[in-house]
Image (cartoon, coloured by chain):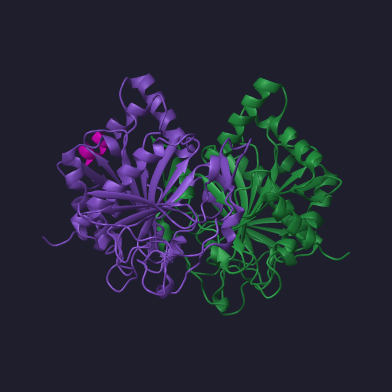
Chain colours: A green, B purple
Amino acid sequence: MKKTTTRLADGRELIYYDARDDAVRDATDARPLDRVATASEIRHDRLLGDRVAIASHRQGRTYHPPADECPLCPSREGRRSEIPADDYDVAVFENRFPSLAGDGGRCEVVCFTPDHDASFAGLTDEQAALVLDAWTDRTAELSQLPGVEQVFCFENRGADIGVTLGHPHGQIYAYPFVTPRTERMLASLAAHRETTGRNLFDDVVADELADGRRIVLDGAHWVAFVPYAAHWPYEVHLYPKRRVPDLLALDDAARTEFPRLYLEVLRRFDRIFGSGQPPTPYIAAWHQAPVRAPQRTDFALHLELFTIRRTSGKLKFLAGSESGMNVFINDVPPEAAAERLREVASES
Amino acid sequence: MKKTTTRLADGRELIYYDARDDAVRDATDARPLDRVATASEIRHDRLLGDRVAIASHRQGRTYHPPADECPLCPSREGRRSEIPADDYDVAVFENRFPSLAGDGGRCEVVCFTPDHDASFAGLTDEQAALVLDAWTDRTAELSQLPGVEQVFCFENRGADIGVTLGHPHGQIYAYPFVTPRTERMLASLAAHRETTGRNLFDDVVADELADGRRIVLDGAHWVAFVPYAAHWPYEVHLYPKRRVPDLLALDDAARTEFPRLYLEVLRRFDRIFGSGQPPTPYIAAWHQAPVRAPQRTDFALHLELFTIRRTSGKLKFLAGSESGMNVFINDVPPEAAAERLREVASES
């Protein structure tokens, strides 16, 4: 893997990750690009105890551009995108319309492939491995930035989930605080350690393996299951079998197995609702230990993948119970979801 | 107000709330209706510490029926709905496809008006007062049910928010546990009491009144403001100025003022995005003290109203940051939202 770091016309960082060690990335960004004012403000909600990023500069962001104006495609003569090169393998750049900016954190865009019409599920094992390398490297670099407390790599896929650019891409948020969801996991972890002396992540994974009903894929180094209390109609959690706090700590065996296993889960996701359905909208969220938390070695890196589609043509909305009270209603029993995800396995 | 309690053909309760004390509600439900099996299961997520309701029987629920098959309209010859009467003022019945059922709680539907094409914002003060009476009575009755820990009255409005029945209606969830959002408020309340000796709700409301920039309406007995750390593009919280734990504890002055004030806020919501826009989708959520919490007298009844629309034709989606990490990104500064909500005041 070769990494080339450069800058866009307005000073934002752009990093190429290439499979070939002899790749040359010397194209420069010739656009007359003004720096967008991007002061986001982090506000604390005293009643809920969480933080909200107020990012008013984002209202003008690019919204469902036509395919021939895609800012994530390689640049061509007469059509300059966010990536000056005329080709790339994986490219990461600072978001021009970030939710988090300045002292408030940093947001990056990860282009998975130069192919506008591809999807993550359609990548080769080698391409997915390169994305894993990019996620890992970004986690390492962003963790070093002053003020960054947590690095979150994720993919939103599908217009139904609010994605405004069709080109296959993910995002990375470097938060200047530990997120509420992670804080809750850390609190559960500490309470479980206190009462049982054991690691809660280890127990959850061991219990799922012992029960078996919700297992989707059981690899040598990773396991994928629908969690017992799944919040979403179809939800899969992927854990490396050897617990590690973050992507940097994965060993070679786990890194090597991941692409095949994850791609298989994503391909099954697109088959859940039968043929003739548009691709399944999903969110894929990497949970990593916070940068500086004392408990970080107890944390278990894992990927949470879920769709908001509940059945053909119907979406799960977060309405009164979910948005008003944070109580999820799930119409699909986790055991039935797991069974469906086993049924639609690729033929081998 | 006259209240008439009866039962539907499958045994579910139906309650009429009439403005006239001489209303007679003796129509019987002549439909051959089988009881829907409705065992919902409450599962505990050990890592997040919350609960999920697994309600698989709901997948077959009524989904965007044509207007002439609306189950919430009064019954007519040849078209029998969930309400056997040929007219009503406000009607409440047990949901046929409940998210919570049996030991797992109870779900009710509140029909605000017999007029299929109306909306809450279009009700008269008298109609809205009757809905307030119904919410209050249901809170009293559901609080008495064994196992119920929290009563949640809410309205989801608009297909964009997942509403599958166009008839103006709300819902009531009687949860068999204290919800995570309320638990968090109770924890903040306790911590604030510990460090300052004061009530956090009182401080939040006093601070908003003193600051003034986010005030939308300041009545004699209620105040409506955009919260400092608003999570949603347009969000308004309504608090009675005399703190009470729940709807039952509201005094007559507050009950009398509420309809006019709330209807004005709802009408402004429909004007946020200018004329020619479809009605604003929203969630309106009543926060009440849990039934049995020791701190219940410290809790402050309030209504949280918010829309998922962020600008004309564009919705705020809960994508990676919100759904993956519970960190909200808000593109509309709360001060700008409040200014807009003052601009679109009704002419008086």
Residue B37 visible in this rendered orientation of the protein: yes
> Looking at this view, is A308 or A119 the one in front?
A308
> Looking at this view, is B234 or A166 the one in front?
B234
Image height check: is A155 above or below A78? Answer: above
> Looking at this view, is A198 or B72 the one in front?
B72
Q: Position of residue B115 (x, y in %)?
A: 30, 67
Say which residue appears at 47% left-offset and 69% top-offset.
B64
Say which residue appears at 25% left-offset and 56% top-offset.
B341
Residue located farthest toward the left when viewing the structure as drawn: B348
For residue B208: magenta? yes
Q: Which quadrant, please, contains the C terminus of chain B?
A: bottom left
Q: Give the range drawn in magenta.
A: B205-212
For residue A196: magenta? no
Q: Where is residue B230 in the image (x, y as percent from the top left)?
A: 37, 47
- Quarter-of-image position of residue A211: top right
Say which residue appears at 62% left-offset and 59% top-offset.
A282
Residue B221 visible in this rendered orientation of the protein: no
Q: Position of residue B250 (x, y in %)?
A: 24, 37
Give the mark count.
Answer: 0
Magenta residues, dominant SS class:
helix
Image height check: is B133 above or below B188? Answer: below
Image height check: is A334 above or below A83? Answer: above
- Residue A124 located left or right of residue B227: right
